Amino acid sequence: KQEVTQIPAALSVPEGENLVLNCSFTDSAIYNLQWFRQDPGKGLTSLLLIQSSQREQTSGRLNASLDKSSGRSTLYIAASQPGDSATYLCAVRVADKLIFGTGTRLQVFP
Amino acid sequence: GAVVSQHPSWVICKSGTSVKIECRSLDFQATTMFWYRQFPKQSLMLMATSNEGSKATYEQGVEKDKFLINHASLTLSTLTVTSAHPEDSSFYICSALGLAENTGELFFGEGSRLTVL
């Protein structure tokens, strides 16, 4: 059974810091991996999608890497801003299902 | 990215009543839609997978007679919580996979918050 874990569970940092959020999964047979952002009481916003054959994807200040063999992905946020405060979720696609991680609650203070 | 719309965004109902939540793909056709449930400060839990024109596939532990799912068209799936009880209060989120999708990216609705009194 695929299990997805995210570390840390919560993170509070001053703005300007570069951050690394970790995601690990137990079964490397994934179709792709997706990182999402969720603001309180809101739905999910897709940030980055990495196919199983890819190693990384970049969008603006965000960079996500994927090491399928070791079952790990990292989301790198450069020069964090208060507007980045949210919960970040990673999810792996297995067959037709998307299995979510436990999430990292990020707070960036001015 | 593709747009998925959910309605209503929030609903309050009395115990014993039924509530219907709609999930629409606005600018693409979705062969498959997924329904998730999220409790406060927890991650998303997949409830069921619905394919257009066929019966939904429910995850283990999810009562199919309690949570009725209909996917009658390529742009609309509905979740009906029947005889709702306070323990059904939760945040329900749908996602959709496009017909011509070849990246496997899923797009999510804004979610529907259900409160059962």
Image (tube, coloured by chain):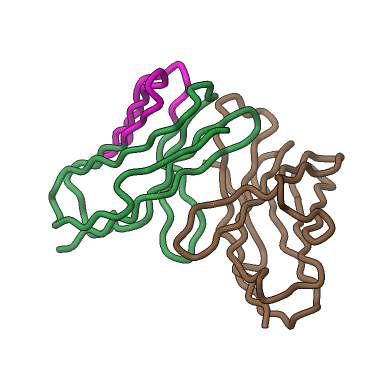
Chain colours: A green, B brown
Residue A52 placed where, x, y %? 47, 21
User: Which residue occupies the foreground of this view, A99 or A59?
Assistant: A99
Q: State the extent of the magenta-drawn residues as a range.
A: A50-74
* Residue at 58% from the left image edge and 29% from the top image edge: A94
The quadrant of the image that shows the C terminus of chain B is: bottom right
Q: Is residue B101 above or below residue B56?
A: above
Q: Is residue B113 above or below residue B70?
A: below
How many marks can you see? 0
* Residue at 64% from the left image edge and 43% from the top image edge: B96
Question: Quick check: B44 left or right of B50?
Answer: left
Predominant SS along the magenta part: strand
Residue A5 placed where, x, y %? 41, 41
Q: Give the quadrant of residue A19.
A: top left
User: Which residue occupies the foreground of this view, A47 or A3?
Assistant: A3
Q: Examine the structure image and report whether residue B73 is included in the region drawn in magenta.
A: no
Residue A51 placed where, x, y %? 47, 23
Residue A21 placed where, x, y %? 29, 41
* Residue at 61% from the left image edge and 50% from the top image edge: B4
Question: Quick check: B50 left or right of B65?
Answer: left
Q: Examine the structure image and report whether residue A61 is included in the region drawn in magenta.
A: yes
Question: Quick check: B15 left or right of A54?
Answer: right
Q: Is residue A95 above or below residue B50?
A: above
* Residue at 66% from the left image edge and 79% from the top image edge: B12
Q: Give the quadrant of residue B97.
A: top right
